[in-house]
Amino acid sequence: MTCFSMKLSASNKDTLSNNTDTLKVNYTYWWPSGGPFIGLCGDEYSLVFTGTITRLNKPSGPFKSHDKTITLYTPQTGVVKINEVKFKKAPGECSKDTTGHEYNGEAYFSSDCFNESRLKEGDKVIVFIYSYEGEYSIPGNSVLRINNFDDSIVKSVDKYIKNNQDPLSIKDDLIIWSKYGLDKTLKKIIECRQTNMK
């Protein structure tokens, strides 16, 4: 499992709602990749769930660097009603800082990571969350639209999680993931796992 050392921008924390029944997760917009398969051999999830988008605010910002010369990202806050938690782990397990809020049965998820996601209110989704500095975090492209809660990619994720997130367990699912443009990413972590087994 990989732990990261960059500090979260305080502005991310300020943009999220204060609803106590909502799990608020910061957007790690600077991570080079996102989605279900990140890292060289596949970083471990901290939280995975299915749900339905109930609200998408208009994009705000843009959020700029401290000297205002570089646009870092454009925040767009969205809310997902959680349907089923597929995997859960305390976000502080890879850090000495265990102050991060762990999922504790909240009914909703909120983040400002939705800009350019092409998602809309009412869409069913599967969400992939990781750990960063003792807190949950979500990189880009980590909220994927699904047709229904029994979608083929949901079943693939279920199998992946059941097998301790071993990519070899879903090596036959490359065609499924190709519909999302994620077959090459999955293939990369499969090859990494195979190399490490030699």
Image (cartoon, rainbow, N blue to C red):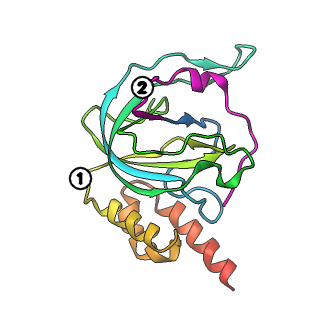
Circle 1 sits in a helix, a strand or a loop, which is it? loop
Pointer 2 residue: 19
- Residue extent of the magenta highlight: 1-23
Identify the secondary structure beneath mark 2. Answer: loop
Would you identify the image quadrant in which residue 71 lies?
A: top right
Q: Where is residue 75 in the image (x, y as percent from the top left)?
A: 51, 24
Q: Which residue lies furthest to the bottom in this view?
A: 198
Residues packed near mark 1 inside 10 Å, few (<14), some (14 to 19) or many (20 plus)? some
Q: How many neighbours does mark 2 have within 10 angstroms: few (below 14), some (14-19), or many (20 or more)?
A: few
In this rendering, the count of numbered labels is 2
In the rendered image of this protein, does residue 115 appear above or below residue 182?
A: above
Using residue 195 as the reference point, say whether residue 127 is left or right of it.
Answer: left
Q: Earlier in the sequence, mark 1 or mark 2?
A: 2
Relative to 187, is 57 on the left or the right?
A: left
Q: Residue at x 40, y 45 (%)?
A: 105
Quarter of the picture holding the C terminus: bottom right
Residue 70 location, x and y as percent? 68, 20
- Magenta span main SS: loop
Report the disc number at residue 148: 1
* Quadrant of the rendered image containing residue 123: top left
